[in-house]
Image (tube, rainbow, N blue to C red):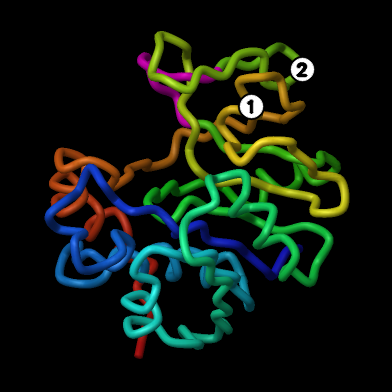
Amino acid sequence: MIDEAVILASGYGTRLRPLTDHMNKVVLPVGGRPWITYVLDMLQGWGIKRVVLKVAYKWNTIYKTIGHHYGDMDINYVVTEMPLGTGGDLQMALHYVRSPQVFVLNGDTLFKIDYQRFYEECQHESFALALTPDEHGNVDIGSDGYITQFSIDPSHLPYKNGGIYLVNKNKFQIQTTSLEEALAKGLRARGYVDNGFFIDIGTPIDYGLAQLYVPKETREWVLKP
């Protein structure tokens, strides 16, 4: 089973300003603790031992929050002066991954998936993504489980990108700095559907909802001192 994960946390958090004027959005407080600690608690529950954090904007605020260790996990930083886009950030981070396969997470989303089933169903793919049902989603899949439509903007497709990926670094390649653009242009990808709790903190409304729901939904993940 995989014991390594990448977290993409380079973005400017523009939609959350002024909250993000002086900090990266993944360290914004949710339920009295930094958001990223919920993501790390989840990964520790998956058995992850090494995390590669791809960072740029206000990355030092993340480092001051969690340092190089969290629980049993080693935290490694890949720093660039500015974000490289989701595709560029991912490709750079993969250079620092030791294992052939790795879980990749968007730093501003939380998705309670059955990670073992996700791995079992998609372990032979070069790229797979976890999807959450959403009547205003941007993704559709065929009967074979592969992505047939991916819209960059919200649409009326049945699924939404849940921000968790399974990547084979030896097989994965894209020619754009945007992962979403690559998917929209037909990047071959397997979709895994899960009904678990999903939320992101990308907008003020969602960030407010996270304050209400995340502490309750993740109570069992909390890392014990």
- Residue range highlighted in magenta: 132-139
Type of amino acid under label 1: Leu
SS type, badge 2: loop
Mark 2 or 1, which is nearer the eye? 1
Report the quarter where the N terminus lies: bottom right
Type of amino acid under label 2: Asp
204 vs 85, nearest the viewer: 85
Q: Main secondary structure of the magenta part?
A: strand
What residue sits right under mark 2 in the picture? Answer: 144
Give the x, y percent position of residue 122. Answer: 76, 40
- Residue at position x 36%, y 16% in the image: 136
- Residue at position x 62%, y 64% in the image: 5
Indicate yes or no whether the magenta region holds residue 156: no
Give the x, y percent position of residue 112. Answer: 45, 49
- For the residues labelled 2 and 1, the Cα–Cα distance comes to 17 Å
Q: Is residue 102 left or right of residue 225?
A: right
- Residue at position x 69%, y 38% in the image: 128
**In the rendered image, which quarter is residue 219 located in?**
bottom left
171 vs 197, nearest the viewer: 171
Q: Is residue 142 left or right of residue 198?
A: right
Q: Is residue 184 left or right of residue 167?
A: left
**In the rendered image, which quarter is residue 137 located in?**
top left
Q: Is residue 99 above or below residue 135?
A: below
> Which label is found at residue 196?
none
**In the rendered image, which quarter is residue 77 located in?**
bottom right
What residue sits right under mark 1 in the picture? Answer: 183
**Mark 2: few/some/many CA within 10 Å (<14, 14-19, 20+):** few
- Residue at position x 26%, y 47% in the image: 14
Report the quarter where the C terminus lies: bottom left
Q: Is residue 211 above or below residue 24?
A: above
Give the x, y percent position of residue 170. Answer: 87, 53
Give the x, y percent position of residue 72. Answer: 55, 86
